[in-house]
Image (tube, coloured by chain):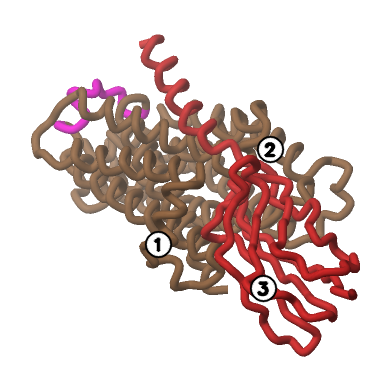
Amino acid sequence: MKNGMIALLAGAAALSWVSTADAHAALKSAGPAPGSVVKTSPKALRIQFSEAVVLGFTGVDVTNEKGEKQALGSASISPSDKAQLIVPLTGDLAPGKYTVAWHAVGDDTHKVEGKYSFEVKP
Amino acid sequence: MTIALGLIVSRFLHYLALSLLFGAALFPLYGLGLSPARAEASLPWLRGFLLLAAIAALISGLSWLSFATAGMSGNLSGAIDPESLSIVIGSTSFGRLWSLRLALAALVILVLLPKGQSAARLYAVLAASFVLLAGIAGTGHAGENLIHMIADGIHLLAAAIWIGALFVLLVLVTVAADTQANSAAAIVRHALIRFSGIGTSLVAVLVLSGLVNSWYLIGFDKLDQLFVSRYEEILLVKLALFGAMLVIAAANRFWLTPRLAAALASGSKPAASIRPLGMSILGETVLGIGVLAAVAWLGTLQPPALE
């Protein structure tokens, strides 16, 4: 009976620990950096989150000042860092201000989103 | 809003189904003093009741997973989108845990399907529902701290024992009211007297583990904001419902149960004392369901201490 109780508690604990929830994913840094001015169009956007993110539910939209969406390649997670999202740009960005609207889901299953902007100014 | 509502309803049904599964499987053992081998023979409705609870636990678990997926993908169609679901199951620990939980719930259904009686089956249902209930503690906001997680697990189990007991008592009282038999009324008296001692310990456990939980989730330095956030508003509603349950439980224990015992002892018809008992247990059950609904809503909100 006692062994049974211990096995039960271990089972419950094991099932619980699998999911030990982390804090929400948050944006830590990005390249080009939020609010920065870059001389040439970046080849890709790199976004560093505080937690590992789930690729299927994490992505960005890049719009120019007129609100036109810019063409993006398919996003990927950095092989060396599961908290880093890499989004290639398919073409060069013309000089101007751009807004990056991002959304991400971390391992805690919470959806978080935000916006930042940068400027291309040769 | 639809996604949030779907998630709250799924959570509520999942808590209720698991509480009934665990609480109702346990009650015959401590509340009626039956051996696991005799429990199913003495209570012919028990297997069907547990089977329904297990099916409800599986379905509500599935819809919890679906609506959580919808929340992650940002639109309602994500709930039934195979691609989104496979991402959640394949690449989040929430999804991996949930597939294990659903498999365990399905196993309980299989165990309960065959007719007939077996002591091993009741043990298996108890073990699986214990793991499923206590395992909820790790999935939520309690998952980050071991003491909080243990307190949350104990809180869930104690609540399930109470809710499950109320449903079994409700069935026993209904049988006694329908048959008008003194033997059925005697079983109700026996069960209520046995449960009253355990009920008091359950309340103590619920209050203590609830205090530990609120320490982590609210923080006592934030008590002055008690009416500020939605989270605390719902928590206060939950506590009010809990308080009302205590009042009814006390009336049962100190007034209605002694009245039934006196009626049985004096040889007069127990019907007059069975009816108010049934009404009070029904009222307590409805309040308990309200508490579970409040908990399901709370779980989708951000607790003040984590803001």
Name the mark on residue B302: none
Which mark is first along the chain, 2 or 1? 1
For mark 2, give the secondary structure: helix
Asked whether disc 3 touches disc 2, contact meaning CB atoms under 8 Å apart, the reply is: no
Could you classify mark 3 by the number of other residues whose Cα lies within 10 Å: few (under 14), some (14-19), or many (20 or more)? some
What hue represents chain A? red
Task: Reply above or below: B184 against A47.
Answer: above
- Mark 1 vs mark 2, CA separation in Å: 36 Å
Q: Which chain is brown?
A: B
Q: Give the magenta range.
A: B31-41
Q: Amino acid at mark 1?
A: Glu
Residue visible at 42% across and 43% down?
Answer: B19
Residue visible at 72% across and 56% down?
Answer: A47
What's the chain of the residue with tag 1? B
Residues behind callouts 1 and 2 on a single chain: yes
Residue tagged 2: B213
Residue tagged 3: A61
User: Which quarter of the figure is the N terminus of chain B placed in?
Assistant: bottom right
Which dot, 3 or 2, sits closer to the camera? 3
